[in-house]
Amino acid sequence: MVRRIAGPLPAWFTALVGFAALAAPGAFAQTPTEDVESVVYEPFPEVETAAYQDDSPLDGESIDGESIEGQTFNGETLDGDILPDPESGAGNAVEVIEPGMINGVEIFDPGAEYLDEGTYGEMATVLSSADDFGVCNWYVRADLVLWVRSTPKDRLLAVDTSDVDDALELIQLPNPLSAQATSFRIEPGARLTLVRNLGRDFQNRDHNVEFVYLGGFDYSDSVGVSSRDPRMLDTPQAPENVGGFNRSDRQEFTLTSDFDSAQISVRLQRRPSSDKMVLSPDGRWTRQMQPTFLSSIMGGMRWVRTSEEFRWDSRRNGVSEADFRGDYDINTENNLFGLHIGTDTAWQTSSFRFEMRTQFGALVNFAEQANTVVIVDSDPATTVTGTFVRGEEDEALAFIAEMGWSATYHITECFSFRTSYDFMWIQGIAEAPRQIDFDFPAPSEINVGANAFYQGLSAGFEFFW
């Protein structure tokens, strides 16, 4: 009697049956049918004879003619055509063609001139290539720089108080736009650039480390004035009771200024585009560099040093320095340290390069000044005499900006000639004439609110290796 189970089977029962089936030996084995006969493969019979279409059998019978229809070979009758012999050409079934024709179709003009067979493998002539641009490991640039420096801000030092109406004479700090004083002359300096190429990235950009020195400038200027009447030169910078600089006959000053700068930077520079292929009139291909706009960015550390010396002398005619004398010596030094960034944009061809450069920097100025004042005056009205030595230091934020334009001619792949015009502006430095202070015996302060402007031309060479 079969008992019917109501409802679905339990899950545990289904799983148990499945595991039992998997565990049974030969669960998924199939027994081959007994009436299927085994297949036996027999080897191909060994070929002992061969026939060739060129009637020169190596072994066996020969076959003649371009067709084997009706011929016998090893006792068998053959039909069809034989294959062409690639060496002898016998039995070629392709239609014989005339020069320039295949099966009656013209493929080229037999009378035209074509490159000979040896020309096919020649490379295009390289007239210029972007591969030669900046591929060296080292690069140096040396420039002779001719720069002029702006003069310090005008400051009135002496006035001729003679009674003559037209006898007013002024002595001022140099101002290149004023006829009352001379200006700094153009001074020579040097700029040396050393670059190490670190390699090229996947975006076709060069990575460089560069060191630049700019400096060697030594500016100097002197100005003097004499009174028309004896002892009529006074200074508006000092009270009447200060001797040595009031009621003098002649006064003069000398101002000198130096400048040096060094920087180390990392530059990321784009390389020229791929070369172009140009077909010459003689039918030959040449490879030429494409004119390209290139750009670069750079950043790094910079040091700038500018120092000045100001010497102001006051004397009386016919009076020894033991009885009347006024000397004011001031020395200032600015050491600027900080960060700078810049960009370059250039139009590069195979022979020329035209470039515009900009740089900006924010630096900390470690400024200091020292002054020595010697006042000798035997006049009873003078109450301030003696020797005063003072000094002061301070730190202040300074800024520097540069811009330049240059043109470069590539004489060879490794040597170029260049010329440029550049200017530079520095804000936040201590100039020597701004430190004049007759408030004795109080200590002097340092003024770091001055600026300087440099500009001029340069010429030099570039060398790669």
Image (cartoon, helix red, strand yellow):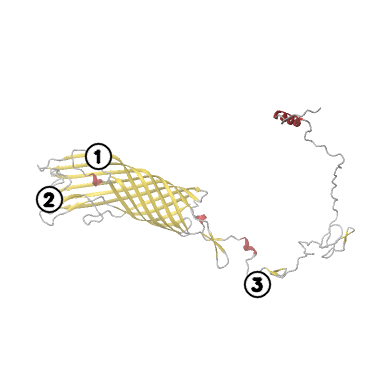
x 29%, y 43%: residue: 333
Quick one: 356 or 182, which is closer to the camera? 356
Q: Residues within 10 Å of mark 2 (few under 14, many from 20)?
A: some
x 16%, y 53%: residue: 226
Q: Residues within 10 Å of mark 1 (few under 14, many from 20)?
A: some
Residue under label 1: 391
* Label annotation for residue 111: 3
Quick one: 396 or 183, which is closer to the camera? 396
Q: Up-down: is 80 above or below 431?
A: below
Name the quadrant of the N terminus: top right
Quick one: 240 or 143, which is closer to the camera? 240
Please, what is the three-letter code of the amino acid marked with disc 1? Answer: Gly
Residue under label 2: 232
In the displayed structure image, the side of residue 443 where residue 294 appears, left or right: right
CB within 8 Å, label 2 to label 3 = no
Q: Up-down: is 105 above or below 139?
A: below
Q: Earlier in the sequence, mark 2 or mark 1?
A: 2
The secondary element bearing badge 1 is classed as strand
The percent coordinates of residue 381 (x first, y second) are 10, 42
Q: Residues within 10 Å of mark 3 (few under 14, many from 20)?
A: few
Distance from label 2 to label 3 (Cα)? 107 Å
x 31%, y 51%: residue: 453
The secondary element bearing badge 2 is classed as loop
The percent coordinates of residue 464 (x first, y second) are 47, 53
